[in-house]
Amino acid sequence: MKFCFLDLETTGLEAEKDSILEISFLVCDEKGKILDSFDEVIIPEKSPLTPYVTNITGISEKEIATKGKPLDTIRLTVNKKIKDTVIVGHNIDFDIVFLRENNFQVPDQRIDTHELARITLVNEESYSLEILSQKYGFIHTDAHRAMSDVEASRDLFFFLQKKIPTLPSQFFQNIVSVLRKTDWYARYLFENVPGEKVIPSFPETKYVPRDSSLPAELQKKLQNLSAQTPLFIKEGDSLVSGEYIKTIAENLRKKEKILIVSPKLSFFEGIKKFPIPEILFNPERAETFVKKREKLSDSETAFILKCILRDILGFRGVDHFNLFAGERRLWKEVHIENPEHPLFQKIITEKDSEEILLASPQAFLRFIDTPCFEERTLLIDESEVFAEKLLFAPTEEFSFFSYLNSPEENISIAAQFFVTQVCREIIEPRIQRALGPFPEKILLEERDIFSSFEQSLEKFVSSEESPLPKKFLTSPPEKSIRWIYYSPFSGNLSLNLWEPQKWREKQKELKKFKKIFFHRHTVSESNAFFRIFIGQEEGIFHEEKDLLLQKTLVFPENPVSANSPDFVPFCADHILEYAQKYVDEKNNLLVNFSSQETLGKIHTSLFDRLAESNITLLGEGVSGGIGKLLQKLKPTEKLVLFTQNLIDPSLAQKNFSHLIVQKFPFSPPHPLLEVIQNLMRESGQSLWETWTMPQLEASISRRISVFPEARKILWLDPRYNSDWGKKVLQSVFSVKL
């Protein structure tokens, strides 16, 4: 058997439009001995080389001019060398697609080291080739040049090949039925392997009780805490507030059990989490997953092997399953569907004994009546987020995703026909144009009844098992609010129904608990936000200076309107100025963007200019996922990091001395809020004052609050000078503008 370890460099990600810039590979025998090699720079034939691509790949116009070869001159040589080999590489399908698009004869046998790594290596922070190479000491001297990646993928392959026999013997016993149903070439690595008899254990992160005291004033207020009288505490700095919440929990747990409700679960390391069924693996459904398929694809095989191993190792939650891209669709087939499932019931029974328990707002609101939560005092972190989850909690949603992707052709075709019918006859007439590449949320009116859709719906949806679609289309409840959400990216359609009475019932249930609300916005005299959206009118207020943001705001001279076409270059110029002025080996710059599109544009415009100053520019979603970016950072590297929505405690370890905020982070409009706004207007109330402003203040505060070293913030959005802009920033930064 011969392996061809292969990697390409290209001008882009689309094989039909973009060019191959470099082809490199090593042909090796089963022991890794090099039998043949190839490493050539290619003259681009489709999209041209750009400075941006040069900075990523290291391939210059000069190198192409002196060393580049036309594809036609090397095609026969490459075909001859890779013939009768197994093609191996990291995310190798990308390279294979490019080669075949350019008329190379690529063997069918392939092994993806990325798939293998995700199966066999558990709890890695990143599975990128670069990060794994650094961690395990593989050759990777010139990251992103093709031959460097080839050498690294070769070393990774043989490393993983030796790792596989060390996996538990039970794993190999459980995957026999999987390997019988697949043509995945890497299956031979898992066949006839005895494995280790002892299942390895992984150390569990344990919560270390805190022995910290609280200010006397706060202790006195805690004594008056009751279900009728909650405590409201203004927070700012996420890290400091997280520690403060844990301190309060420690002080209260001496008398009662505590439940911390927070969207920032990673900030409470070691505290046991309350799960929802959908994040838990169900071994029974994994068996069904295999049985119902006549043949497993390569990606399905890698996915189910990964799940089976982690289940044997004792991992329950999806966080340990390293889902990747399309695997979230497959996860829907193997997670626990029903809260009544014995495994889920067993887990929540175990949680009842925890003195301090942690839950996301969604999990708490969904299972608010579970005995596990009874008699607990609630510490509700990020109350603005909690209020949003509470508002949307009664939403009934029906997704057509599983029907569209059904292996039964008659069901998937009927679902596709139905979605097309809805798009053509409901959505497009409402938006008065053809559907584009962006998602659409369409609000329905009370009089909208679609009885004519019943017949096509009944072809694939049983009304007994899924009553919502029929109720949604033909007989919606009185005063309910309905909207349709369509995503062109996935092709999925969802029907959403919201009833105000169910929202009020959730608010009543919340009043059973003693509660402490940690909030980020400035509470008005009427306490309107909490009164309307959480149903809590009275309370005790407390403010600790140490919890608030300790940062200085700076505004540019001659600001440009955020709606002006000159705003993006204006932002780019100021980012460049700040980077060149403040970034060095000890001080880095972080820039927060309101959209991924703008982030990408400015990233492209500044990449070369910053490279001239020997400054590394990384962009979330442009240079890779945030986990990969954080792993790549070097202690002395001069860095500018672009982010969009980032709240990660690990960033606190990075020395960002300066922050730049490009724009006020408004949330996109939602049909439910549009209806609520109209209702509030009729009663003389303002959604802007009671909802939008608090949410905006909270969003800004969350985005900039995990950087303890950053004392100065440059605010580029000129709307800071408006009345509402001043009010928002004064609330967030506790300053007078």
Image (tube, grey):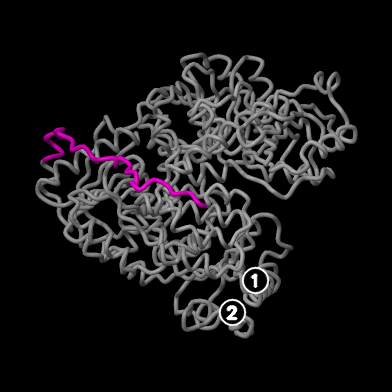
State the residue in front, 105 or 612: 105
Disc 2 packing (10 Å; few <14; some 14–19; many ≥20): some
State the residue in front, 627 or 341: 341
Question: Would you name the residue on which mark 1 appears?
Answer: 419
Which residue type carries mark 1? Val
Q: CA distance from mark 1 to mark 2?
A: 12 Å
Residue 608, percent across and down? 69, 22
**Number of the front mark, 1 or 2:** 2
Disc 1 packing (10 Å; few <14; some 14–19; many ≥20): many
Disc on the earlier residue, 1 or 2 = 1
Which residue type carries mark 2? Phe
Q: Are marks 1 and 2 in contact (CB under 8 Å)?
A: no
Residue 638, percent across and down? 54, 18
Residue 113, percent across and down? 58, 41
Instruction: Say the numbered circle drawn on residue 460.
Output: 2
**What segment is highlighted magenta in the picture?**
192-219
